[in-house]
Every structure is written in C-alpha cells, then in structure tokens.
Image: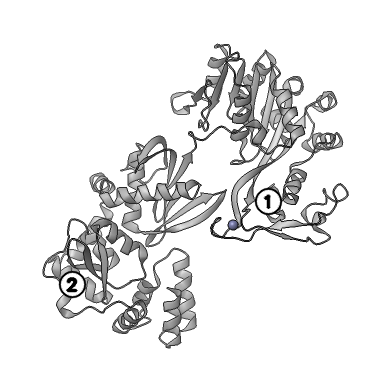
Amino acid sequence: MRTFLDSLRKRGLITPEQSAKLEQTALQGGESPIRSINRLGYVEQQVLAVELSRHFGIKPLEETDWPETSVLPDCISPRFMREHRVLPLRADPQSITVAVSDPGDEHVLNAIRIASERQLDLRIATESQIISRIERLLDGGDASASTVVSRSEEDEEHLKDLALDAPVIDLVNRLFREASAARATDLHIEPARGRVMVRRRVDGMLQEAGTLPSDFGRAAVSRIKILTHLNIAERRLPQDGRARVRAGDREYDIRVATIPTIHGESIAVRFLSATDQVPNINKLGLVAQDIELLKQQAMHAHGLIVVTGPTGSGKTTTLAAVLDFLNDPARKILTIEDPVEYQVEGVSQIQVRPDIGLTFAAMLRSLLRLDPDIIMVGEMRDSETAKIGINAALTGHLVLTTLHTNSAAGAITRLLDLGVQAFLIASTLRCVVGQRLVRKLCVNCRKQYTPQSDILAELSPELTGRYKKPRHLWKAVGCDHCSGTGYLGRAAIFEMLIVDDALRRLIRPDVSAETVMKAAKSKGMATMLADGFAKCCEGITTVEELGRVVAED
Ligand SMILES: [Zn+2]
C-alpha cells in the first residue's frame, strides 16, 4: 500500500502531507488509505480507480460485468458487501469475480476467499459505483436504513448465527493455530476504529498479527465467547471464563477475559500450557551450586520455600520443577492453584473457585485436614492465606508458594506486610528464589561484538569492581528463524536467598529489603543482575534485554 501511495504522490495526485496522514491513520489501526482517500476526497474516484487498476494489475470493471441478481448470497451477506464496498459479479465452482474499490485490503479479500471457498478474480470499480449497485441489486431504497438497524440491533440470535458461520469458525481455528505455531502465550482481539486488530504475545512481547474487518472480528469474539461458555449477549460488562476447547484438529486449554471498549468488545485469550512437560529442576537455568542448595532446602520435612517475581516471570514453572523433584509415592503432595498450569503426575492439584467460595484460604484450611506432607499454594495474595500457610509450615508441612515482589529479599517485607509475625517468618522461611525472564538470543543469527569499556557501569554500578569487563558480548540480529526479532524463547535469571542463622536474626518487624539484600550479598549471593550478566557473557541473552527486564523495578 505504501508503494501505491508513493506512486500517487509521484504523479502529483496527493501531497506528501496527505500521504503521511494516510499512512499514519492506517498504522494506528484506522481505516485503509483507499477508504480515507475516498472519504476525504483527495483524489477523484474515477482517477483513483484507474491508478489502482494500473498499480495492482487488475482489470477495470466493464459495464456488462454488473450482475442481474445476487451472487452467492448465502456466503457474502449484504451487510458485508455494504461495509466493505465489494460486490460479487459472478461465480463458477472454482472462482468468484468480485468488484472491489480497495484491492489492498487483504483481510476483506481473505474473508471472501474463505466464505466462498473459491479463488478470487478481481475487478476495480469506484466506491460509489459499487454502493449504488449493491442498493439497486438488493432493491432497497430503505437499504441504508436497514444497515443502521442491523448494526445497532445485534441481538443474541444474530451474534450466535454469525459465530456459527463456517468462515468464522475457520477464522478462529486459524487464529488459534497460528498463535500456537508462533509460540504465543496470549491472543488479543481488539476492536479499533473501522476494524479489529489481532495481536499475540510471544516471549513476553506483543506482536501485531494483522487486522480483521469489523464484523468478522466481532463474530470471532462471539465465537470464542461461545466456546468458553460466556454470555454472548452481554457486551457491556467484563466477563471471564476458562475452558478446554476444540478448534480445528487440536484442543486448547484457554482462559479468556472480555473488556468493553469504546469501539466494541475486546477479548484476551491466554493459552494455558496444561499439557506442557514439567521442566526438570536441573534444567531451569539455575547455576549448579544453586540447584544443590534448592534441592537441599526442598528435602526438609517442614518450612517455607518462596519463589518471587512479577507476573509472567516463570515462578510457576520453577515451583512445578521443585514439586516434580519432590514427587514420589512416599509423600503426599497437594496443590491449590489459579490456574493449574502444569499437571504433575501423582499430585492432587486443585483449582481455586472464589466464585463459589473456594478461595486460597478456604481451600488451604480444608487441605490441612487431609494430612499432606507438601503443600503448594499458587500465590499468597492475602493475609489470611499467608497466615494459614505459615502455620502449616510451622507444624510439620513443607509449604511452597510464590509472592509478587521484585527481589528475593522483598519476600520477607512482603510477608510482614501481609501481617505475618516476624518470629514466625524467621522460624519457617528456608529460602527464597527471585526470578525474571529474559528473551534468549536466537543462536542462528546472534552476533559477537567487543563491548565498550564502561559496559559494566552502564548496566549497573553494582557490577563494577565485582566483575571484569568481558572480552566479548552478543547482540540480537534477526533472521527467518526468529521472525526477525533476534530472540527465540526465554530463559530465567535467578537470585537465591538462603535464610541462615545470621539472616534469621535480622528478620524483625522493621527490617528493610535493603538490609536483607546487603546481608545476603555479603554472604556471596549472586543477584539476579549478576546472574543475568553471566548469561549475557555466555551468549544466552543481551545486555539490552537484561537492562529492559531488570529496569522494570
Ligand atoms: Zn534469528
């Protein structure tokens, strides 16, 4: 589309300012440049049609091409034709000839291809020609009125119909399949002005994955809501749900959340990796010495082990690996999670359901009556859960949990904030693993370079004096393997705080995270930053990535 705008500009049909404005609008997810040109009247429609025909190598429409009756009315609805200014001219079993005013709108063309199950043969016509023909064909002086009505009165039945349309089912199957192929953890379908944007989260970063025509996008949202048993008529209130769904030839465990926005309902799909392999504790990416320490601590019959980090930092993965390590028939292991992300063979895992009163605290209280050896509590979010959990750790259970804090040292102050008494923390806490995820360099295209002399100071003054400037580091380049990002997959960076006698004595009601951190460092604890820096030197990640992740504090 940019080359088309360039050619219009070169021929003096639009000004550079107009061209920039059109691109800007399209980039922000607004209407397509051709639609804007027509609406703003930058170029006379007939002239535009000639230019489009020449640029895209598509035949202009002949007067005799106009159809007498509707073509494939079951596949292409009047609504779709009006909204996208397209009109099917004729069809045979293999192909469909369609008049279009915007041949650059791939999503509309794709929608027709999918809906008609035919090859496309295009003819260029002007927007006003197409609109007037659609109305003449549908025999409606009242047609424009019915457009307005059908838009505002999307009743439940209509949405359901749309969502059960084969093209929409295909679309959702394709979105899921592509998200999975791209290793996406999340899929976002978000209405913008005039269209619907699709984005995916891969390795923690959002990527654009195209746009859909509005009605198609809205139907996809309804389809996903039906799959996850949400109320499709309710589009003004947020909803969330979870289900194992079948899409195409695969099943997906998904959790969805809908949010009403000014442009319509937006939906976020999280793909839960319940079928993922539980990682091995030796392969988490902890240094050998820390693996041994963690195993030693986990082998104790009672006490508390905490994993800390922000949302999406791989805490659950670490806990699952520890559980898997501890998992043998001689130990009774129970978990309370929200959601259950990894299924561990032989472990009873329970999903919290706050909507029916099964909160973390309530579940934990009942679980203790089942006499478990080890309990994993997905997260200690509230004071009640924290207090019951600490009591369990004190009374002969090994309790594993996560806390949402920036550093390992922060776990102690967080527990104090949750109302747990300092002496109870001191007598139960065994170790805290702090972690973050960094994107891993794509080994296919990463490139070595010699860093500047002040690289350590630039990253953090904490590193200078303790580490020598590395002879070389690695940078991200980008290739086909990694979709041009230079990164592929993620790795964790860790810090491990072992609570020994000296540290235990420091745990008082007014202790600060800094004091704990300082004491731990003086005992030789490598911080997350130091661990990450070691991973930069090994070519696992880059200093830019480390800076991005650690600077989130
Ligand atoms: Zn690459």
How far apart in space, not on screen, are marks 2 and 1 (Cα)? 58 Å
Position of 273 with respect to 141 (left or right) is: right
Nearer mark to the viewer, of 2 and 1: 1
Q: Secondary structure at mark 2?
A: helix
In which image quadrant can residue 137 be found? Answer: bottom left
Q: On the image, numbered disc 1 is attached to which residue? A: 541
Looking at the rendered structure, the secondary structure element under dot 1 is: loop
The residue positioned 62% from the left and 15% from the top of the image is: 373
Classify 116 as above or below 501: below
Residue 420 shows in the view:
no
Residue 440, horizontal then vertical, whole percent: 63, 49
**Colouring:** one colour
Name the kind of residue labelled 1 in the image.
Thr
Ligand 1 within 8 Å of disc 1? The answer is no
Label located before the other in sequence (2 or 1): 2
Q: Residue at x 79, y 30 (%)?
A: 510
Q: Image quadrant of ligand 1?
A: bottom right
**Residue matched to label 2:** 133
Q: Residues within 10 Å of mark 2 (few under 14, many from 20)?
A: some
